[in-house]
Amino acid sequence: MRNIWTIAKREYKLYFMSPVAYVVAFLFLIWIGRIFYLNIKDALQQSLYQPYVPTATVSIGPMILILVFTMPALTMRLLAEEQRSGTIELLLTAPVRDWDVVVGKWLGAFLFMLTLLAITWIYPIVLNMMSSPGIDQGLLISGYLGVILLTASLLAVGVAISSLFNNQVVAFFVGLGVALVLILVQPASTGAVGTWSDIVSYLNYLDHFNNFYQGVIDLKDVMYYLSVTALGLFAGSVFVESRRWR
Amino acid sequence: MKRDWSRYAPVGLIIAGIAAFIAVCVYIIVPKWSIWLQLSLISMVVGLVAYVALVPGQVRQAIKGRQVRYGFNTLLMSLAFLGSLVVVNYLVFYNAKMNPKQTRWDLTEDKSNTLASETLDALSKLPDVVHAQAFYTPRTDSSTTQQLLGNYAKNSKGKFVYEFINPDQKLTLATQAGITADGQIVLTMGDRKELVSVVSEQELTSALVKLISNQKQNVYFLQDEGESDPNGTSNDSMSHVRDTMESKNYAVKTLKLAVEASIPQDANIIIIAGPKQPVSQTSVDRLAKFLDSGGSLIVMEGPDMLLSKGASLTDPLADYLSKSWGITLGNDVVITLEANQLTLEAKAGAYGNHVITQKMGAYTPIFPGARSVTTAASAPAGLTLTEIVLTTPNYANCFPACSWATTDIAGLLAAANGKGSVPSQSAADVQGPVPIAAVGENSTTKGRVVVFGSSGFASDEYQTLGNQDLLVNAIDWSAKQEQLINLTPKATKQRSFTSSVMKYSNVTSNLIFLGSVILLPGAVIFAGVVAWVIRRRRG
């Protein structure tokens, strides 16, 4: 556990020295900020005719699309760069398990994203100050929980993809492709009866986020995203471990 | 010289690869165990067998090799891990389906994602699977309905299933289901059906309760004086209404009151749909007793008799309704002026505040021949009277349409016979909007009356525009079905911007722009530049 934490701390600090991370953070915040501003402007106009305040999820919804692009950008160098520069061999001969390396790198990226998400709390705080009697805090908590779980799972997938390649750019584009498939390709989940329909509905990646977005925490949605995270990290450690005998 | 066949081994692999690709493509195109799929798979196996047969030594070495061993171990480990995840997810999913209360938490303040206890109770009592078909075109927003139906399904333990159907693409299915507008839901349980026109938890749960209810209401259509026949086949029959009522668990029967000694004991509602002759006084007396014992009566009487008999018409039923219920069928005929055309077809322009018409907002029923139906200014004791359907108003310039009810019946008849023009408006006429339907409810006897000033508006000829929906709603109200369920109302918090924000809305908007688009992202760039400078200084 200590190894994981050591690697995570190192990776977290490295992000603050990396220009890519600042660019990602800038684009993330300007995207969310612009949409927040447009929503508030629109709401102020509507409020002239009837009481209307955007919900607490005004800043959460836009995050999903921008996460699709930020995740591959943050994870592309995690293992691909190590493999390209040859430092992966040094790392693997150190007294750390492959699992420690993968999870540690993921955790570093996850902590960086948590920092970024913490900054975005300014928007619901401002909205709460502007409205009476304040925003629905339950909706805010469930929405952010959903985003955090989604982020964790996308990062794990990104780490797994990064472990496959020596080239960061290739890792970025493959990661972007996979993220787009997960977010945009949604099998029909109409609620029709049948085992196959249940399976297809359950595998719908974004469907599980909808409950969080609407203020509901469902155990199966939490389990789904934790499972995707675990699967991504497991796949990453398998790919790293396979280097020893490939 | 011994031929070296081993150099053809890669061909076997290539054949196997191509055959596998073809098998996948064939299955995607025709997802069946077809002959082509079988041939592709056989070819794949043959290719692999050929490869193994031609280079057995290489294959043996590969299988025993380090990579294959480690790879196989990794594959087993991966399958085991994946299997564990599948099992855990299945257990959580199954538990969530069976015990949604214990695995699902609605954090919203007004519990907007939580169904009312009455709804959960109804869902738990479903004796059979209820299939909900939601008919929505892409033009109508279905997100709220999807969420609502999803909640019903989650809390039903598999007894409530739903699907969305685009009526543009499946017109026949929509017609069979009785859909008359976009955004309606049909609930089906066995051979019983309920239509939900306005989608809300209240309406859906009411429809569920009606489906569950075993209580059969008996509706009798009077057949004494040439009234519309629910079992007929002509355009002025009401077979479609009959089918709809039977699917809602009503028993539809006919009654010849002039022949039978009394009204059947099991009658809940009597419908008089367009009598060609006045109902006899004897029948009216029996109907009065029926109403006094808590029964319900629906009268659909247009100006047909008035036009055929004129001033000599004696109508005991109309007299009874006027004297005992304060509901008066006017001796007039509604005229509508639309696009410079005069017509005797009235259109609904407004609705009164009543449960029969509260769901009719999207519809504009047409009444082929109508007369006024007015309520007494001061209702008789114990009665609640409401005018529920009114025609279009009498605008000065008659746009989009205007209407009034002419009392000059003789003039109208003369115009119909080509002896003069349609009487123009006069002070004696009933000015638009003309009430053409009214209801009365007796709080003491619980008797209910619905009077329409039009005879054939719900016949088989008029199956759209809400005509039959209006009559079905009236029958449901007459059957006292609207109070089956009253959901505990949810306290919804109304949110608004503070007064200071509204007072300085422009400044607020600009401040938001400054902070969220410029300062915050700008701070990130600044931090990045500072980090870069520090790194450079450190070398």
Image (tube, rainbow, N blue to C red):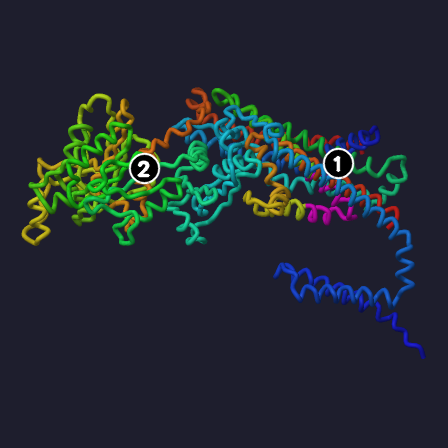
Amino acid under label 1? Trp
Q: Distance between the residues labelled 2 and 1?
A: 65 Å
- Mark in the foreground, 2 or 1: 2
Q: What is the span of residues highlighted in magenta in the rendered image?
A: A154-175
Given contact means CB atoms under 8 Å apart, are the residues at marks 2 and 1 in contact?
Answer: no
Q: Which quadrant of the view contains residue A119?
A: top right
Q: Is there one chain holding both mark 2 and mark 1? A: no
Amino acid under label 2? Ile
Magenta segment includes A209: no
Determine the main secondary structure of the stretch shown in magenta. helix
Query: Is residue B194 at least partly visible in the picture?
Result: yes
The residue singled out by tag 1 in the image is A106
* The C terminus of chain B lies in quadrant: top right
Query: Is residue A25 at least partly visible in the picture?
Result: no
Q: How crowded is mark 1: few (under 14 residues within 10 Å), some or many (20 or more)?
A: many
As helix, strand or loop, the secondary structure at mark 2 comes to: helix
**Is B307 placed left or right of A242 in the picture?**
left
Residue located 65% across and 64% down the image: B34
Relative to the observer, which residue lies in front, B234 or B457? B234
The residue singled out by tag 2 in the image is B475
Residue located 80% across and 45% down the image: A239
The image position of residue B224, as x and y in percent, is: 20, 44
Q: Which disc is residue B90 wearing?
A: none
